[in-house]
Amino acid sequence: MARMFRSGFPLILFLIFALASAALGQPTTDPDPPDPLLSAVSAHGPLLLHLPGIGGPRLCDHRMLAGLRDGGVKANFVICDWTENDPGIAALQGYARNRREAQRIADLILAHIAADPDSPIYLTAHSGGCGLAVWALEKLPPDVKLQIVLLIAPALSPGYDLTRALHHVDGNMYAFSSLLDTVVLETGTRLFGTIDGFVQPPGADPLFYQKLIQRTYQRDWARYNDFGDHIGAMSRPFAKAILAPLICPATGSTTQPSDAAARAETRNPKSE
């Protein structure tokens, strides 16, 4: 009997320690490690935070960011891979996980503000990342505002109410879409999600919607390697010529016809 007690004595001590720790409110597991992007977003100076599509960071993302640099955007460029190394349809449909990632993105924005409250923040996103961008904006405190938001082929329902997100945009939110982007935006998302342009739903605040500027594909953007496909607006020349001036107007200007004119041009192209 004494031998059995001695062999089980270490286990008894462990159980006593665990129960005492719980009673005192002490953690019995290690805390979560800090976000690896925390130091990057905390750097002083303007921040440009980019959210890729459901495939995670790809060459098109790096080309777009390079084009913004070419166009004169001066900022600390940080890519946040919200897919958690689990890209594809799982990333698009992981609603609960994506909501957690949206909070993470909001926390990264707040970390930058805490480190350098007077520097501007620009948020760019492509495809599925646009949904995370909008959700992250919605999670920010009421007094937090970003300067510019760029959404390229946004992955949200056309009738999604952007009022809460637009409340956190000090300048404009630009949404780029293409009626020619049928392979992904029409066929793919009909099966796995909803990705399209936006319409102002009933009950949305029209004052905030004045900040939303939508740009439909224009045929002359082909000169910038944008041919109206799902990643056309991510090309380096397009980012330099069209996107960068939206962030830094002093670097240049672009001629942006109305959406109605752009749609008419797409549906009824001029003969060469």
Image (tube, grey):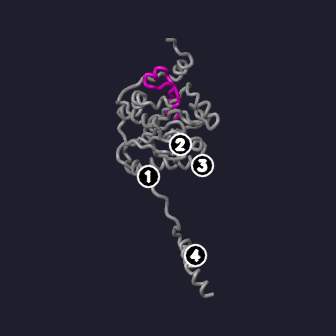
User: Dot 2, crowdedness within 10 Å: few (<14), some or many (≥20)?
Assistant: many
Residue hosting label 3: 96
Marks 4 and 2, how far apart at CA: 43 Å
Q: How many marks?
A: 4
Identified at 46% across, 32% down, the residue is: 234
Under mark 3, the amino acid is Ala
- Corner quadrant of residue 182: top right
At which x and y percent is residue 170?
45, 38
Earlier along the polypeptide chain: callout 1 or callout 3? 1
Question: Does residue 184 lie above or below 39 as drawn?
Answer: above
User: Dot 4, crowdedness within 10 Å: few (<14), some or many (≥20)?
Assistant: few
Asked whether 68 or 166 is in front, the reply is 68
Q: Secondary structure at mark 4?
A: helix
Earlier along the polypeptide chain: callout 2 or callout 1? 1
At which x and y percent is residue 5?
60, 84
Q: Which residues are magenta?
A: 208-230
Identified at 44% across, 49% down, the residue is: 110
Earlier along the polypeptide chain: callout 2 or callout 3? 3
Question: Does residue 252 lie above or below 36 as drawn?
Answer: above
Q: Secondary structure at mark 1?
A: loop
Marks 2 and 3, how far apart at CA: 12 Å
Residue hosting label 1: 36
Residue hosting label 2: 132
At which x and y percent is residue 56?
50, 42
Say whether marks 4 and 3 touch (CB < 8 Å).
no
Which mark's residue is nearer the viewer, 4 or 3? 4
Q: Secondary structure at mark 3?
A: helix
